[in-house]
Amino acid sequence: MSKKWLIVSGIVVRGHQVASRKSEHYPHGTIEMQMPFFRQLGLDLTPYYRATLNVSIRPNTFVMKNPQYTFRSVRWTSLHPPEHFSFSACHVVFQGTSHEGWVYYPHPETKARHFQDPFLIEILAPYIPNIQYGAHVELEINAAEVSVMHAL
Protein backbone atom coordinates (compact mmCIF):
# COMPACT_ATOMS: atom_id res chain seq x y z
CA MET A 1 0.00 0.00 0.00
CA SER A 2 1.52 3.33 -1.02
CA LYS A 3 1.64 6.29 1.32
CA LYS A 4 -0.32 9.44 0.67
CA TRP A 5 2.05 12.33 1.29
CA LEU A 6 0.67 15.62 2.52
CA ILE A 7 2.90 18.58 1.62
CA VAL A 8 3.24 21.22 4.32
CA SER A 9 5.33 24.39 3.95
CA GLY A 10 7.34 25.64 6.89
CA ILE A 11 10.24 27.71 8.13
CA VAL A 12 13.19 26.39 10.13
CA VAL A 13 13.24 28.04 13.56
CA ARG A 14 15.42 27.88 16.64
CA GLY A 15 14.37 25.32 19.26
CA HIS A 16 15.34 24.87 22.90
CA GLN A 17 18.76 23.61 21.74
CA VAL A 18 18.88 20.75 24.22
CA ALA A 19 18.36 18.12 21.49
CA SER A 20 21.72 18.82 19.89
CA ARG A 21 24.14 19.72 22.63
CA LYS A 22 25.24 19.45 26.21
CA SER A 23 23.27 21.69 28.53
CA GLU A 24 22.96 22.60 32.18
CA HIS A 25 20.86 19.47 32.76
CA TYR A 26 22.20 16.97 30.22
CA PRO A 27 25.77 15.72 29.59
CA HIS A 28 24.98 15.24 25.88
CA GLY A 29 22.23 16.37 23.54
CA THR A 30 18.92 14.72 24.37
CA ILE A 31 18.64 13.03 20.95
CA GLU A 32 22.00 11.32 21.42
CA MET A 33 20.90 10.22 24.89
CA GLN A 34 17.54 8.89 23.66
CA MET A 35 18.74 7.07 20.53
CA PRO A 36 19.91 3.86 22.32
CA PHE A 37 16.49 3.53 23.96
CA PHE A 38 14.66 3.93 20.65
CA ARG A 39 17.01 1.43 18.96
CA GLN A 40 16.33 -1.10 21.72
CA LEU A 41 12.59 -0.58 21.14
CA GLY A 42 12.93 -1.17 17.38
CA LEU A 43 13.70 2.19 15.73
CA ASP A 44 17.33 2.71 14.70
CA LEU A 45 18.01 6.42 14.29
CA THR A 46 21.80 6.18 13.94
CA PRO A 47 21.77 7.46 10.30
CA TYR A 48 20.24 10.75 11.46
CA TYR A 49 21.83 13.92 12.75
CA ARG A 50 21.78 14.15 16.53
CA ALA A 51 19.52 17.18 16.64
CA THR A 52 16.01 18.12 15.67
CA LEU A 53 15.11 20.32 12.76
CA ASN A 54 12.42 22.60 14.17
CA VAL A 55 9.92 23.60 11.50
CA SER A 56 7.20 26.17 12.12
CA ILE A 57 4.11 25.33 10.10
CA ARG A 58 2.14 28.32 11.41
CA PRO A 59 -0.79 28.93 10.94
CA ASN A 60 -1.18 25.14 10.93
CA THR A 61 -0.92 22.67 13.78
CA PHE A 62 -0.74 18.89 13.66
CA VAL A 63 -1.89 15.78 15.49
CA MET A 64 -0.20 12.40 15.52
CA LYS A 65 -3.20 10.18 14.81
CA ASN A 66 -1.67 6.81 13.94
CA PRO A 67 2.14 7.07 14.07
CA GLN A 68 4.31 4.25 12.82
CA TYR A 69 6.00 4.02 16.23
CA THR A 70 4.86 5.00 19.70
CA PHE A 71 7.05 4.21 22.68
CA ARG A 72 5.43 4.71 26.07
CA SER A 73 7.09 5.45 29.39
CA VAL A 74 10.65 5.68 28.06
CA ARG A 75 12.96 6.33 31.02
CA TRP A 76 15.91 7.84 29.17
CA THR A 77 17.06 10.09 32.05
CA SER A 78 16.77 10.16 35.82
CA LEU A 79 16.12 13.92 35.79
CA HIS A 80 12.37 13.62 35.17
CA PRO A 81 9.62 11.01 34.79
CA PRO A 82 9.45 8.70 31.76
CA GLU A 83 8.14 10.17 28.51
CA HIS A 84 6.07 8.94 25.58
CA PHE A 85 7.46 9.41 22.05
CA SER A 86 5.88 8.91 18.63
CA PHE A 87 7.49 8.81 15.18
CA SER A 88 6.16 9.04 11.65
CA ALA A 89 8.25 8.76 8.48
CA CYS A 90 8.51 11.98 6.47
CA HIS A 91 10.66 13.84 3.94
CA VAL A 92 12.25 17.27 4.24
CA VAL A 93 12.55 19.03 0.88
CA PHE A 94 15.17 21.79 0.92
CA GLN A 95 16.53 23.53 -2.16
CA GLY A 96 14.99 20.89 -4.42
CA THR A 97 16.49 17.90 -2.60
CA SER A 98 14.40 15.45 -0.58
CA HIS A 99 15.80 14.01 2.65
CA GLU A 100 14.18 11.08 4.44
CA GLY A 101 13.43 11.68 8.09
CA TRP A 102 11.05 11.19 10.96
CA VAL A 103 8.52 13.41 12.66
CA TYR A 104 9.78 13.26 16.25
CA TYR A 105 6.98 13.81 18.74
CA PRO A 106 7.73 13.82 22.46
CA HIS A 107 4.20 13.77 23.87
CA PRO A 108 3.61 17.13 25.59
CA GLU A 109 1.67 15.55 28.45
CA THR A 110 4.84 13.68 29.48
CA LYS A 111 7.45 16.28 28.48
CA ALA A 112 8.23 17.98 31.77
CA ARG A 113 11.13 20.27 30.90
CA HIS A 114 10.09 22.32 27.85
CA PHE A 115 6.98 24.01 26.52
CA GLN A 116 6.29 22.87 22.98
CA ASP A 117 4.95 25.37 20.47
CA PRO A 118 1.82 23.80 18.90
CA PHE A 119 2.81 25.23 15.48
CA LEU A 120 6.19 23.45 15.53
CA ILE A 121 7.04 20.05 14.06
CA GLU A 122 10.34 18.50 15.15
CA ILE A 123 12.10 16.43 12.51
CA LEU A 124 14.97 13.97 12.73
CA ALA A 125 16.86 13.95 9.43
CA PRO A 126 20.36 13.39 8.10
CA TYR A 127 22.66 16.40 8.17
CA ILE A 128 21.36 18.84 5.54
CA PRO A 129 24.09 21.16 4.19
CA ASN A 130 23.38 24.91 4.14
CA ILE A 131 20.09 24.71 6.04
CA GLN A 132 19.74 27.47 8.63
CA TYR A 133 17.18 29.38 10.67
CA GLY A 134 14.71 31.14 8.40
CA ALA A 135 15.09 28.59 5.59
CA HIS A 136 11.90 27.61 3.79
CA VAL A 137 11.28 23.86 3.59
CA GLU A 138 8.50 21.56 2.54
CA LEU A 139 7.61 18.59 4.67
CA GLU A 140 6.09 15.53 3.09
CA ILE A 141 4.03 14.03 5.89
CA ASN A 142 2.31 10.64 5.86
CA ALA A 143 -1.37 11.66 5.84
CA ALA A 144 -2.45 8.30 7.33
CA GLU A 145 -0.33 8.97 10.42
CA VAL A 146 -0.37 12.75 10.92
CA SER A 147 -3.22 15.24 10.51
CA VAL A 148 -2.47 18.88 9.72
CA MET A 149 -5.10 21.54 10.27
CA HIS A 150 -5.40 25.30 9.95
CA ALA A 151 -5.48 26.75 13.48
CA LEU A 152 -5.70 30.53 13.08
Image (cartoon, grey):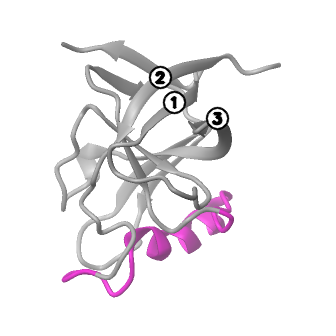
In the picture as drawn, the residue positioned furthest to the bottom comes out as 27
Q: Sequence-wise, which precedes: disc 3 or disc 2?
A: 2
- Which amino acid lies under the numbered mark 3 shown in the image of this protein? Gly
Q: Residues within 10 Å of mark 2 (few under 14, many from 20)?
A: some
Point 40% across, 53% down: residue: 132
Residue 138 has which mark? 1
Residue 96 has which mark? 3
Asked whether disc 1 touches disc 3, contact meaning CB atoms under 8 Å apart, the reply is no
Q: Position of 108 compared to 126: left or right?
A: left
- Which amino acid lies under the numbered mark 2 shown in the image of this protein? Val
Check residue 40 for magenta coloring: yes
Query: How many marks can you see?
Result: 3
Whole-angstrom CA distance, mark 1 to mark 3, is 10 Å
* Secondary element at image label 3: loop
Indicate the position of residue 60 as horizontal and vertical percent values.
31, 20
| Residue highlighted by disc 2 | 8
Where the N terminus falls, by quadrant? top right
Point 51% across, 56% down: residue: 130
- Residue 20, image quadrant: bottom left
* Secondary element at image label 1: strand
Q: Sequence-wise, which precedes: disc 1 or disc 3?
A: 3
Compared to 27, does 7 lie above or below?
Answer: above
Asked whether disc 2 touches disc 1, contact meaning CB atoms under 8 Å apart, the reply is yes
Check residue 27 for magenta coloring: yes
Q: Sequence-wise, which precedes: disc 2 or disc 1?
A: 2
Range of residues picked out in magenta: 23-47
